[in-house]
Amino acid sequence: MKFNWGKRKPHCHIRGPFCHREAETRDRAIDELLEFIWNLRENGVSNLADLQSEASDPEARNILSYMEQEGLFAREGDKVYLKEKGEEKAREIIRRHRLTERLLMEIFELSEEEAEKEACKLEHILSPEVTDSVCTFLGHPPVCPHGKPIPPGKCCTAPEKSVKPLVMPLNDLDPGGEGRIVFISSNFPARLDKLSALGVVPGSIIKLRQKKPSPIIQVGETTVAVDPEIVHDIYVKAV
Amino acid sequence: MRKRGKNRGMESKDINRKSAKEIILVGNPNVGKSVVFNYLTGKYVVVSNYPGTTVEVSHGTTKWRGKNVTVLDTPGVNSLLPTSEDEIVTRNILLNEKDALIVQVADAKNLRRSLLISSQLAEMRYPFLLVLNMEDEARERGIKINYQELSSLTGARVISTVATQKKNLEKITEELGDLREATLHISYPPALEEAISQIAEFLPEENISPRSIAIMLLSGDKSLKRWLHARLPESRVNEIEAIRRSCQARFDQPISYLINQARLKKVDEIVRRVTIINPIKRKRLSTRIGELSVHPFWGVVILIGAVYLLYQVIGVFGAGVAVDFMEETVFGEYINPFFLRWTERLVPVAWLRDLLVGQYGLLTMAMTYAFALILPIITFFFIAFGLMEDSGYLPRLAVMSNKIFRLIGLNGKAILPMILGLGCATMATLTTRILESKRDRIIVTLLLALGVPCSAQMAVIFGMLSGFSPMLVVLWGGVVGLVLAVVGYLAARYLPGESSDFVLELPPIRLPRIGNILIKTLSRIEWYLKEAVPLFALSTFILFILDRAGILIHIENGAAPFIKGVLGLPVETTQAFLIGFLRRDYGAAGLLALARVHALSAEQILVALVTLTLFVPCLANFLVIVKERGWKIGVAISGFILAVAFTVGGLLNLILKITGFKI
């Protein structure tokens, strides 16, 4: 079967060329299409036309109608939306994909392409237990390396003690603790600009001097008092 | 636009500037630019130990190669890709000044952040001198820098100084003679580089490189809009925006953030190669004090101690002992009798005599209030404030108070102008520039004008309240505080715009240098006298004229129903409010005169003081608000405040009457 991939970014936003070679079995094809719908929705699109051009050959069409029979998604006029079952399934795939990306890019320091390629494979096969372990290990990250939200799992609401997170929000360090910044998850460009001008960027060693009455962080000889939200946004790997 | 070749801009600029007109000091906040400025020019601009002391560009002159050269002291910047108004000011100077020599003053112990600025100066293709200041502090912390290596890696000339001890400062002018263009070059990810060169193609070659402007534009710098429109046709501007958009679409992180990361990566590489750190295990006493001052428990203890000390120094000694001495002994026994005698003898005209030494006399009223009542208090305030600034305690107060300010939608930074406002609201209004968002600045400007009593006002208030029960002080403070909190809360809720993040750099705790405190206090007193005395004289003169022309009595009669009916005050207080339009403290001084002759009851004093504390900003403050925020906001703030002042005063009077509360 042939998917029409078009000119798109080769990462988690919208499926890239890497996943397509792997999508051989029907289950995988279903996963891919669910993921596609999810990503479209994140970008504010839910056109049937998009989905149909995505799955243009007969085989893919078959799969689409099979998915519709199974109650994974439904159409309404020219719009598509995920039904409960499909929503659940898509959510898990996206979660596995984005968590794997985080793991591969930030812990194993793979390049973006390599990480993407591997994530495309792993998103189909990771068991729920392993997924939650990865999530805990990474400190329940809210977003993927590209800034897209990672759907939270059970582990995120009830953190288990069995896996010690390797990456955690700076706020979880004890006062006086140090870590290397892995990423800063902030949706405010102004906040990122201000922090980076002070030398607070991924890779820097950061120390949490205190949490109350206001958090104080230290990078090198720069001491900065910040809002509590900011120390929640900075994710560090303990050193 | 004329077409240019690809290598345009690569030819070397004439950097051996024999005919430089200006020396520009740039650098991170709180690295000592102002100390260097003072050294070079022999002028004094305020030096403090916290970021953001310099809010206006100061000009001075120095001799360089036998000629007078202008020196500019710019507000500190953390990046030349501006994120605050200060940074825009400094960036624009670099953008527009021609033939300038750049001196980058840097904190030697904070090389990383210094080089972040250097990399941007190099990008602009400005030759510059890198002055690594506070070399002593770096040494204390076990940081050693290889200056030669640093110079060869960056291509900039490097010297090390201890500005506060004038160590090596003479080298600055020596080295300025042969500046070279820095070789420090940052490469960005390929997609960014491509967009940068596309944009740079469109830009004219001016005194900073098209590449650096292209990087700013690519980062989405909106402050360049006017600059851009003055040079390029609309279609080009749109084209640039289109390039930026399509470039941003290829990344999920903001371009500016990627650019800063690329710069820091290169900078870190250099820092690793030129510094050796032998960490010193022993915790310095100053560090320990710094930690305690922001401790959840000890911080509060220290805060209470500091406030008590301030009260003792300013309230008890300044407002009590010093004012009594000045007013009763110096002015009461010597100066005023002396003037009285001599005017009696030398001035034959009765009305002229009255103008000088009468009830509304320029000498007896204006000068006595200015020098005997207010000067002693404001002097002690400025000394105490200077100590808080130079020790580095002031920004730590922001850490302690951040939570409280967040309740009213501001952040801890707001405490800096608020405390300065206890000295002089006019000065403090200028300091609101350290707040990032326009909304925050308007709110703090409003609160300052509304109810933060300046020390002149407080002087008089303390004077009035002494002799009455402490209850009066508590009630006055409580009512004014409540009004501030309510107005602040409502303003934060209903003013459009976003509140800004609390990100405040804390300077190290340092032992204040007495010399700097004294010179700073003197320069502030000079500023105060220049500002206040003419207004005192003017308001006295207006009162005198109104009195002579028989208008005062009409105004008093006209206002009587309001003053008497709504506020429950004697008619004589009208003139206090009248001159309060020019200066609140002078108005309060008028009330003090009435209180001294027991013309007011304790309850009346409370109502009068609350109303006058909340009263319209003084003329100087009003003018500064207009200058900073524009006419509309200036007039709106004043009108609003006048309404609040009388409403609160009226309500307070009503409540006191109904409940029959006696103080």
Image (cartoon, grey):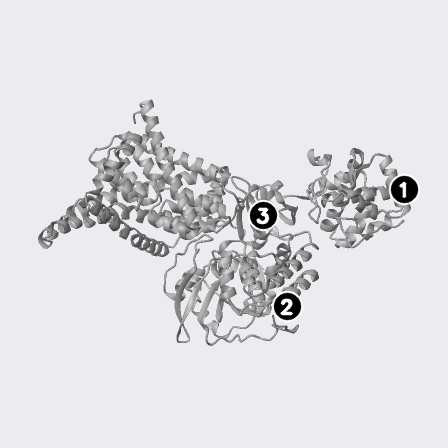
Residue type, label 2:
Glu
Residue B4 seen by the camera: yes
Per the image, the residue denoted by label 2 is B201
Residue type, label 3:
Lys
Query: What's the chain of the residue with tag 1?
Result: A
Per the image, the residue denoted by label 1 is A62
Is residue B532 toward the left or the right of residue B87 in the image?
A: left
Residue B107 seen by the camera: no
* Label disc, if present, on residue B448 of the rendered structure: none
Task: Determine if marks 1 and 3 fall on one subunit.
Answer: yes
Query: What's the chain of the residue with tag 3?
Result: A
Quadrant the N terminus of chain B occupies: bottom right
Task: Determine if marks 3 and 2 fall on one subunit.
Answer: no
Q: Nearer the viewer, residue A106 or B125?
A: B125
Residue at x 50% of width, y 59% of height:
B139
Q: Nearer the viewer, residue B34 or A176?
A: B34
Bin the neighbour count of mark 2 within 10 Å (Cα to Cα): few under 14, some 14-19, many 20 and up.
Answer: some
Per the image, the residue denoted by label 3 is A207
Quarter assignment of residue B2? bottom right
Q: Secondary structure at mark 1?
A: helix
Bin the neighbour count of mark 3 within 10 Å (Cα to Cα): few under 14, some 14-19, many 20 and up.
Answer: many
